[in-house]
Structure formats: structure tokens, C-alpha cells
Image (spheres, grey):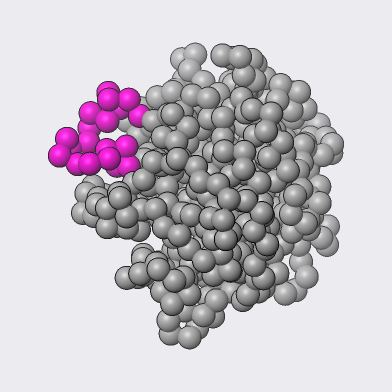
Amino acid sequence: MTRPTSRRTVLAAALAAAAGAGALSASPAAAASPDPSAPSPGSAPGPSGRSNPLVDNAFWASYDDWRAGTAYGTQAVTAAGRPGLVIATPTGSVAYADPHTGKTATWEYGTWTSPVHRSSVPATEAIASWNAETPSGTWLQVELQGRYSDGAETPWYVMGRWTAGDGDGDIRRTSVDDQTDGRSSISTDTFAVDDAASGLRLDSYQLRLTLYRKPGTRLTPVVRRLGAMASDIPDRFTVPASKPALARELRVPRFSQDIHDGQYPEYDGGGEAWCSPTSSAMIIQYWGRGPSAKDLAWVNPDYADPQVCHSARYTFDYQYDGCGNWPFNAAYAATYQGLSSAVTRLGSLTDAETLVRAGIPVITSQSFLEKELTGSGYGTAGHLMTVIGFTAAGDVIANDPASPNDDAVRRIYKRAEWENIWLRTKRYNASGAVVSGTGGVCYVYWPAEPTSAQRTALRAVGLL
């Protein structure tokens, strides 16, 4: 069985320069920009972790982190015992023509720009992620601007326009296509240098948040965490297997995407393509969270595992036309009280063992031919599954949503095969053509107040 093709099988060498699908009445960057006469943000590095020498993580989440940025109309607060960023006094208003509803509305906004973060890894790719609450009538935009290794700057790239809801008072969650400066481009949720072989790299970057609300209200998003993963994973068809160091299995609920085949086709064609939201639903429930009965009232009561349908609806990217936007899945998980999340890359199954040892499962992205993963029964150009443990021999215990029913979701895959299809960046498809792999991309969801062991594990892989 061949799974649906992912847009990440090939990153475009260059995208046509355009404003992107849907725009503010001014350009996205201009509309969200702070006062140009104000002083530029400082150059102090953001908090960073580096467990993998090919990956740099930087995140802003504490009260001091938010205070370290440059704010126009936003402020750091402590709400419900946790720090965050909110709208204080809006600095202006802007009209947004939503390309997915056809409606134009005016929104008040404030901005926050991070200090410049100099990456410990001169990078070919970067992926932002965030944790936020967006009451109906609010939304946010995340942008990235970087400096290349030759000193030139990128444009301000939109990494996502996001809201947790999709009611009448909300915009539609969306990535923005056709963003490029001829040297780098945005592929849905991923910044990528167009020609990595040229030696050009992203040396540093800033993130900018723009928080929006309906004019005349006191509504506000609350952003709890913002960051990015920058990486330079070399071209590689094979990756040596790491040595087993853990035998443990976490009790993660099992959900099949395939039992939802044909349900709610407006969301990525229905369940057969819902590997990402199904995996997210499994881990959210593992942490004792999930949608309420009221939240699920819209789902047909004849459908099993309605939380999977809910996850698909609320991770859906209306521009990508799918549920596989990595940061949107992580952001969805963090809408549940007491959960944090991030998108990153891990260096090996040793890193996954570090997290599983502390009770933290990992959602991973991989692509493979059926013959490359014994027992899978299918091939895929892009698929998400969860690592929930390891056998005594070191093989991977995975909850694989590409299964005929919930009972069949638990699988055991050979360690060397599994590690290779996850970590490689190049592979041959069924036609013999060279296509890309994800290079160790994963989502990690964990308690906002982790235990000591969990904190140690998260710090070890660069997430705290």
C-alpha cells in the first residue's frame, strides 16, 4: 500500500516570487512590522540546546525571555501560573483578506520580535513551532528573518498564520506559498536554502510574532512558547544503527487512521491520510488530555475514536490542504491545558531512548519502500508514527496509525531499518529516482510542568 505523497519528498529549488495565497492589505511583513524608526532588536542569543551537533534548538518561554524581546503593543505576563505574551495596547490595525473564506476583516495587532539568535549550526533548514491559546476572534502570525553566511539578510518569511479554532470569528489556519528570495524558500512550514551544495547557510535569525484581535475588544492570544529548530543534515542514503540501551514500553493508546477512511473528506481527503493528527491524538490522550464531549459533539456518533476526527479538523492547513503541517500539529497539542510541544530533529534512536526512558513518546516522520521496513505492509512518500518503546533486542515498538484497526496499531520494527528510514535525507523511490527523506524530524509533546527526570531528558535533546 502506498501512502499519500508528502510535499516534503522534494523541496522546490526555487519558488515563484509572489505575495502568497492570501495577504494583508499591506504586505504581510509590512503589515506586521513595528515602527521603523524604533531601535532594532538586540543581538543577545536566545536560550539554546544542542544534543545533536547537526541541530540547534532555540526557544523563548520564560517571563525573562519575553522581556528580552522587542515589544510593540504586546507585553509579558504571568497567567494561570505560566508566563506568556499577550496584546497590551494595539499599535495599529490592518485588513486581512482570508483566501480560504473570501472574507475581509479588520484586526488590531501588536508585535514581539525575538533577540537575534546565532545558531550553533550554520543551517540549511529551519522550522518554527509555538504553543499558544487563541480565543475566538484572535489569531497569530509567526515570521522568520535570517542572516546568511555571506552577510546578506533574508526577507521576513511567514512561517504560519494560526488560530486554534475555525468558527465564524476565526481566520483559517494557513501556511503561505510562493515565498522566496531566489536563495532560500519556504516549503509549507520549512525554511530551506535552495542550493545547499553552494555552501550558503543561515547563520542567525530572529522570530517575529504578530498577535491579532477583533477591534474594540479586550481579547488576546496568549503565547506560551516560541522557537525554531535549525539544522544542517548532510545528504545521506544510509545511517548506521545506534546501539540499543533501553528496554521499555509506554502504555500509549492505539488509534488507526484507516478506520476513518472516507470520513470528513474536506480534511485531507479523509482518514486514510490522517497519520499526523492520528499520532497527535494518541500522544495527547497518553498525557491524559483530549477534547471534551462538548468539543466532539460535531462528530458523527457512529464514528469510532472521534478524537482522531477532531485532531484532523483542528490541525488542517487550508493552504497545504492537509493535516500534515508539522508546527500546526505541535500547536494543536499545546492547546490542551498543561501540555508543551515542539518540532525538532533527533540525532539517533539513542535520543529517542532518552525521551522514552523518561516516559515521553516521540512522533516521527519517515518515508520508505515496503521492502525497506519489514512488516510494514506498505510504502510511503511521507508518514508519521509514534515511538512508544524498545524491545530487549533494541527494536522499535511503534504505534503505527497505518493499520487496519486499533488492535493492529502496535508494531515492532527492526532497529537498523527503522533508524535508517527516519534519519536519512536521500532515498530511491519505486521508480528509482532520488527523492528526499526527513533527516530525523519529530514532534515531542510533554507536560508543561515536567518531572525532574523528564526535564533532564528534554534538556539532553535540546528542548529545554
In-image side of 412 versus 3 (left or right)? right
Residue toward you, 121 or 157: 121
Asked whether residue 144 is in view, the answer is: no
The percent coordinates of residue 183 (x first, y second) are 68, 65
Question: Which residue is drawn at the image coordinates 41% and 74% (left, top)?
Answer: 370
Asked whether residue 82 is in view, the answer is: yes
Residue at the limit of the structure toward the front, as seen here: 392
Quadrant position of the C terminus in the picture: top right
In-image side of 14 versus 240 (left or right)? left
166 magenta-colored: no
The percent coordinates of residue 445 (x first, y second) are 54, 38
Q: Which stretch did the figure color magenta?
A: 291-309
Residue 434, picture quadrant: bottom right
Question: Which residue is drawn at the image coordinates 23% and 47% (left, top)?
Answer: 264
299 magenta-colored: yes
Residue toward you, 134 or 383: 383
Residue at the limit of the structure toward the bottom, as seen here: 432
Question: Which residue is drawn at the image coordinates 55% and 76% (left, top)?
Answer: 427
Question: Which residue is drawn at the image coordinates 81% and 47% (left, top)?
Answer: 118
The percent coordinates of residue 309 (x first, y second) are 29, 42
The percent coordinates of residue 451 (x first, y second) are 64, 27
